[in-house]
Image (cartoon, rainbow, N blue to C red):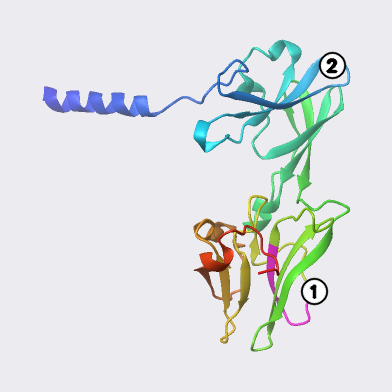
Amino acid sequence: MKAPIARCMLLLLILSACTAAPRRIYISDNDFVEESRQYSPDRAMLILNYKLDIGALGYSNGGTAVLRTSDLAKDLTQFSLPDNLQQAKWIDNETISARTDVIPYIRNDEDPPIRDIEVNGVKVKVAPYDHIENEFHMDTEHREASPDGKYELVAYRYCKDRSSLNFIHISVIHKGESVPKYGNYYIADMSSDRILYGTWTKDSTLVFYSNSMYADHAKYFFVRNRPNIKYEIIVDDRRFAAKYLWTELN
């Protein structure tokens, strides 16, 4: 009887050791890297953007903390904004603005959580952000009718000019329809387009091209309720190994 009890106790100890508590982060930590700080108008508080150095792997995503100057020696995680908020800026001494990236929610057909919050006594006014600035325009990379004449494949992005390209949107629309603001088939993100070219096959299904670096990740960026047209992804390192954006210079 004692042996099973001992084994159970050992298992509980192992499980307890494996359940790590959330990490506390201090400015004095060896891996702490300050990216920027922005003081409130009265300089009593600041927005601190930081990341963590993870050695050969680069940097972690880090975070944004809203601090009183007296908080600089404290654990930053208790004053940090939620990870989905970005571009925090002071409006006045008691209020900041921040944006929520709505693209993942659009991709997954979900309502984004746009609501104001409070962090460290400061009001945070939250607005949606779709990476389309006022001065951007739609720039079409590729437009092609399907062999059966029913649909069009359209790959496009939003940008101010070609010197700084935003991520790709891919839509499949009925012939003659207007192109939707957001891709209804695929929406990439700022890291890479991952899909680097696409076209119709002779039986009016889709074939997309990628490289060995991005092909396995592309499946996570297809729109959940996309048009019901089959696709396949082909890895072609000969043509696309050095690319990370879909451009018609393929």
Asked if one can make out residue 114 in the rendered structure from this viewpoint, the answer is: no
Residue 105 locus on image (x, y percent): 66, 52
The answer for how far apart the CA atoms under marks 2 and 1 are is 49 Å
- The chief SS type of the magenta part is strand
Say above or below: 53 vs 184: above
Residue 123 locus on image (x, y percent): 79, 28
Q: Secondary structure at mark 1?
A: loop
Name the residue nearer the viewer: 88 or 213.
Answer: 213
Magenta range: 169-178
Q: Which amino acid type is shown beneath numbered disc 1?
A: Ser
Q: Across the whole image, how many numbered discs are drawn on residues?
A: 2
Q: Secondary structure at mark 2?
A: loop
Q: Of discs 2 and 1, which sits in the foreground?
A: 2
Q: Which image quarter holds the N terminus?
A: top left
Residue drawn at x 53%, y 62% is 211
Q: Residues within 10 Å of mark 1 (few under 14, many from 20)?
A: few
Q: Which image quarter holds the C terminus?
A: bottom right
Q: Residues within 10 Å of mark 2 (few under 14, many from 20)?
A: few
Residue drawn at x 37%, y 29% is 18
Task: Specify the farthest residue to the bottom.
Answer: 148
Of pointers 2 and 1, the one earlier in the residue sequence: 2
Asked if one can make out residue 72 in the rendered structure from this viewpoint, the answer is: yes
Q: Does the magenta run of residues contain 100? A: no
Q: Which amino acid type is shown beneath numbered disc 2?
A: Arg
Residue 56 locus on image (x, y percent): 50, 35
Quadrant of the rendered structure where residue 176 is?
bottom right
Disc 1 target residue: 178
Disc 2 target residue: 43
